[in-house]
Amino acid sequence: MAIYNPKSHKAEEFINHEEILETLRYAEENKHNMTLIRQILEKARPQKTENGLHCTGLNHWEASVLLACDIPEIIEEMYRLAKEIKLAFYGNRIVLFAPLYLSNYCINSCVYCPYHTKNKHISRIKLTQEEIQKEVIALQDMGHKRLAIEAGEHPSMNPIEYILESIKTIYSINHKNGAIRRVNVNIAATTVENYRKLKEAGIGTYILFQETYHKQSYLELHPTGPKHDYDYHTEAMDRAMEGGIDDVGLGVLFGLEKYKYEFAGLLMHAEHLEAACGCGPHTISVPRVKRADDIDPSVFDNGLSDEIFEKIIACIRIAVPYTGMIMSTRESQEVREKVLELGISQISGASRTSVGGYTEEERPHDSEQFDVSDQRTLDEVIGWLIDQKHIPSFCTACYREGRTGDRFMSLCKNGQILNCCHPNALMTLAEYLTDYASEETKKKGFSMIEEELKKIPREKTREIAARNIEAIKTSDCRDFRF
């Protein structure tokens, strides 16, 4: 029997089944232990020190106790703490991005994804470089600066050379004042050599969802294809970091397996990256199973209520305070509005999950990976965020200034990253408002900027940011950053 070891690079040891089961037993036994729960909440509370912010987070045992707790007043206290931690580390900023689907050719047979190889009636599409260029221009003309590229796993249709060429194409396009400044990559688990090539291509974060940490369920959900190899998939982040990629993004597809099991596994993976690789996950995503072409989410009997989903997000934020948390347009406006307060720091906007969808006037459905619940335009999303007192941010400065991996984490964990992120968010919002926004969004957006500038504590930083924003409004000068 494998022994739990967070420093091990073997999947069965750092995501250990018996360890998770023991964690869940402990959480169930202690879910009403008020003395312990109070101690856990106090441990997680951010503290200001001479060196800045200090927030320890929680291990998977402690966080699982909070998730299991069903006492209403404790849950409300958890939500207040999650909001406090979110504001301490990320302020009221929300980073915007869009997915870009390159190809839906795939040789896997994942039973929850319409791209599975047995689906013979879905339209199979692979974008040419010319088509990618048109997609990118369409995204730039909306105002996007950050993309997450997606592709099915197919060695001949979507080889690493195609991904690398596509990244080069994306970075090469500058339409009007538009530019994609950060390309994150969400492709199948691959080799150290290929991760090294992705790093050399200038990617931002490498994202790979585990789907489920329950090995037996994983094998059943991925019956054939290279993704069937649980260990190879689960150990991908270790290889990515060995290949030089220091920003990685985790995620499970909630609804495939019992949520408490997945939650513990997700936190164990984060702890493993810290222990074995020296740097925890740059982001954690929280997708839920959604309807798609030939996929009915009701067949997976582990669906989550919105209330449980919100609790999971709050508990992740409390347990892993430094990580960026991502929510896509899988979720409705109503759900997204609630969880922005509980820990989410990045959202997609105006997403199309079909291959080649951005150049189509009407949203195509024949090659979608999942149904999009929030179908608002990017301008509508930006206006909504401003109304909710969140600063829409298109910032990519840390990546391009070399503040990645442990360098980013050290600044984030002590709260110093806010000195860069707040003014950078305001400057990128000014770019969006000047170049792309409707008159209504522009008016309230610049009003927000004026008020938020006053909150920058350092006078010199405040003066530089104000001067740069004025240059953005009155000239073609762009891409200022701290």
Image (cartoon, rainbow, N blue to C red):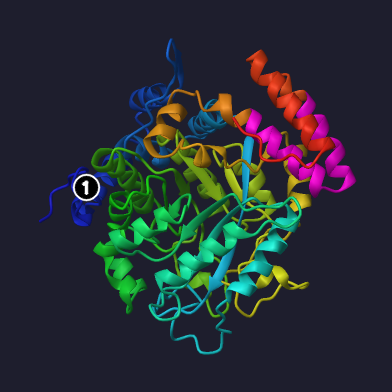
> What residue is drawn where x is 50% and y is 23%?
416
Tally the marks. Answer: 1
Q: Is residue 354 visible?
A: no
> What residue is drawn where x is 31% and y is 58%?
236
Q: Quadrant of the C terminus?
A: top right
Corner quadrant of residue 126:
bottom right
User: Which residue is most to the top?
Assistant: 50
As for residue 435 lying within the magenta part, the answer is yes
Q: Position of residue 19 (x, y in %)?
A: 21, 47
From the viewer's side, name the closer residue of 180 and 238: 180
User: Which residue is most to the left?
Assistant: 1
Corner quadrant of residue 42:
top left
Q: Position of residue 304 (x, y in %)?
A: 50, 56
Highlighted range, magenta: 423-450
187 lies above or below 159: above
What amino acid is at disc 1? Answer: Glu
Please tell me how crowded label 1 is: few (under 14), some (14-19), or many (20+) other residues with Cα within 10 Å.
Answer: many
From the viewer's side, name the closer residue of 473 and 412: 473
Residue designated by label 1? 19
From the viewer's side, name the closer residue of 473 and 405: 473
> What residue is drawn where x is 54% and y is 38%?
343
Q: Is residue 269 visible?
A: yes
Q: Is residue 392 left or right of residue 14?
A: right
441 lies above or below 113: above
From the viewer's side, name the closer residue of 404 and 248: 404
Q: Is residue 215 left or right of residue 169?
A: left
As for residue 248 lying within the magenta part, the answer is no
Main SS class of the magenta portion in the image? helix
Q: Is residue 426 left or right of residue 62?
A: right
User: Which residue is most to the right?
Assistant: 439
> What residue is drawn where x is 33% and y is 78%?
225
Q: Quadrant of the N terminus?
A: bottom left
